[in-house]
Amino acid sequence: MKPAAFEMHRPRTLAEALDMLDRHGEEARLIAGGQSLVPMMNLRIAAPPILIDLNSVAGLGGIRRDDDTVRIGTATRLQDLIDSEIVRAHASLLAMAARHTGHYSIRSRGTVGGNLCHADPASELVLAALTLRAEVTLRGKHGERVLPAQAFFRDALTTAIEPGEILTELKVPVAPAGAKAAFREHARRAGDFAIAAAAALRLPGSGGLHVALGAVTPVPIPCRRIEDSFRAGRLTGEIGALVAAELAGLEPIADIRSSASYRRKLASVCLADCVTEALA
Amino acid sequence: MMLRCRVNGEQVEMDLPPRLLLADFLRHELRLTGTHVGCEIGVCGACTVIVDGAPVRSCLMFAVQANGAEIRTVESLAADGELSALQVAFSRHHALQCGFCTPGILMTLQAVRERGAWPRTETEARELLAGNICRCTGYQGMVDAVLEQAP
């Protein structure tokens, strides 16, 4: 099908984009890579009367390191996460996650900001951002706020972004030397939506272990039992029982891609493999 | 809304409705019907073209978003009627049957080659090709062609 008619605006600066967003209110939708929005428009699940195209806005892309933070502009293409030496060296979990995000040509167009704001339960980037304790910067007409990923992702397809705000940056703490990241995913084919995914980051010394599970619940969830056990020095040998306990209270999503019980099974495999690799 | 871009090396300037998909612009306005439209939701990859060096689903981009861009379609591959090395390899390995998906696959591979990201192993080749749905060949011929064409 073809999308319904709409008006398109092409702002050149962030200030201009924020003005347009403010002026048009709920009528307007932002478009960056369009890899989630355009399919919905083609299916007429979405029919925004006004689109504000962020692709010509100067200064929204790019990846740089700023002391202890890797700063990723919202318009950065997903494939750039994989190709970036800065990301591979200092936030490698993001590159690992992006490799599972869509196909090469989807990643060549899809953006970091679009993926995060769409907040699909199966988003690898959302899972990685939560695992890495990342932050997002939101700009509105009257200022800027920075939220931890934990507070930004509220529910399936729902974030804490307010009308009139634009997500401008993803900020990821630089992984200290000796940190080890691991990522696991199961999907029907490479690039499809995950049925289950897990991410882990082991920090050196007493820095702890961060583990989270994606695609199983509306928002990826931290695996506190595993994290706590690691901190208490009890995470040795067989982790199967711990993974089972972690998943015990969960009600996995059942959808077209998987039943709840199959998803639970794949989640336990992903989680066990991922943690094992991070600790190896 | 005005679109000024280059398509297969030629300057194009047209006033277009914003809702026109890049795929439909190429096919209906420019009559470049080598770009095929399969699913229109970004799943099948048949409509893949190269926009500023990147492989892009042309059904997931509005034509006016290509303003200022350099676009290449499958029609650009054969220079003076001579098939490109990759096209010849596809023919030799029977990497196509009905040919509907082939333009999208060729353009994906062309972009990947230019970006220096050519698959080195069978696993990498299959992972890349998974982004384009082919229901005839079972992919084996394509994998053979890709591995043979490794730089």
Image: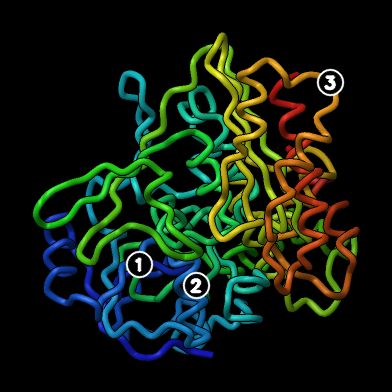
Check chain identity for marks 3 and 1: say if they share one.
yes
The residues tagged by marks 2 and 3 sit, at their Cα atoms, a distance apart of: 48 Å
Image quadrant for the C terminus of chain A? Answer: top right
Image x and y of residue A278, in percent: 69, 25
Q: Which chain does the numbered disc 3 sit on?
A: A
Q: Are marks 2 and 3 in contact (CB under 8 Å)?
A: no
Q: Residue at x 64, y 81 (%)?
A: B39
Discs 2/3, front: 3
Helix, strand or loop at label 3? It is: loop
- Determine the image quadrant of residue B75: bottom right
Residue beneath label 1, please? A31
Discs 3/1, front: 3
Residue beneath label 2, please? B60
Check chain identity for marks 2 and 1: say if they share one.
no
Q: Amino acid at mark 3?
A: Gly
Q: Residue at x 25, y 50 (%)?
A: A138
Residue beneath label 3, please? A237
- Determine the image quadrant of residue A211: top right
Q: Is residue A108 above or below residue A201?
A: below
Image x and y of residue B51, in percent: 46, 61
Q: Is residue A255 left or right of residue B10?
A: right
Q: Amino acid at mark 1?
A: Ile
Q: Amino acid at mark 2?
A: Leu
